[in-house]
Amino acid sequence: MFVCVQCNRQMRPKKNGYEFIELAGDRPYKLWSGDLWECQECGQQIVHTDPRQSPLAEHYQPIFDDLSTGVTTTAKEWSRK
């Protein structure tokens, strides 16, 4: 279960198979597919992936550019800042 911290409301799945690009610094690194969840009240969204998942493609693979065309969501590196 995912809960919106802002609204205290349970989130619902909006789209399965939502693709996004993981960044390494400012460069595309891996293409992933996750599930897009949304708060029914305020519209806040998250993308959830399972830890057992593997990326659809990585930057060094020839198919990466073709598969990532049109993907607009990116995941920046995590930091403690």
Image: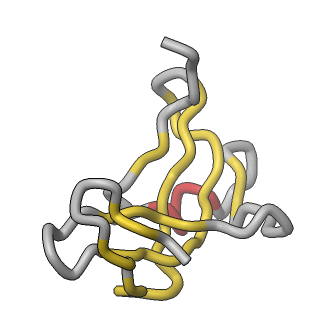
The quadrant in which residue 23 appears is: top right
The quadrant in which residue 49 appears is: bottom right
Residues 64 and 51: in front is 51
* Count of marks overlaid on the render: 0
Residue at the far top in the pictured view? 81
Image height of 18 relative to 7, above or below: below
Color scheme of the displayed model: secondary structure
Residue at the far right in the pictured view? 52
Image height of 58 relative to 7, above or below: above
The quadrant in which residue 73 appears is: bottom left
| Residue plotted at (51% across, 77% down) | 35
Apparent side of residue 43 relative to residue 80 in the rendered image (left or right): left
Image height of 11 relative to 58, above or below: below
| Residue plotted at (70% across, 60% down) | 57
| Residue plotted at (73% across, 44% down) | 60
| Residue plotted at (15% across, 76% down) | 41
Instruction: State the image coordinates of residue 54 (x, y, percent, origin top left).
Output: 80, 64
Instruction: State the image coordinates of residue 61 (x, y, percent, origin top left).
Output: 74, 53
Apparent side of residue 65 relative to residue 6 in the rendered image (left or right): right
Image height of 23 relative to 21, above or below: above
Residues 41 and 32: in front is 41
Apparent side of residue 33 relative to residue 46 in the rendered image (left or right): right
| Quadrant where the image shows the N terminus | bottom right
Residue at the far front in the pictured view? 8
Apparent side of residue 35 relative to residue 64 in the rendered image (left or right): left
Instruction: State the image coordinates of residue 8 (x, y, percent, origin top left).
Output: 30, 66
Instruction: State the image coordinates of residue 79 (x, y, percent, origin top left).
Output: 56, 20
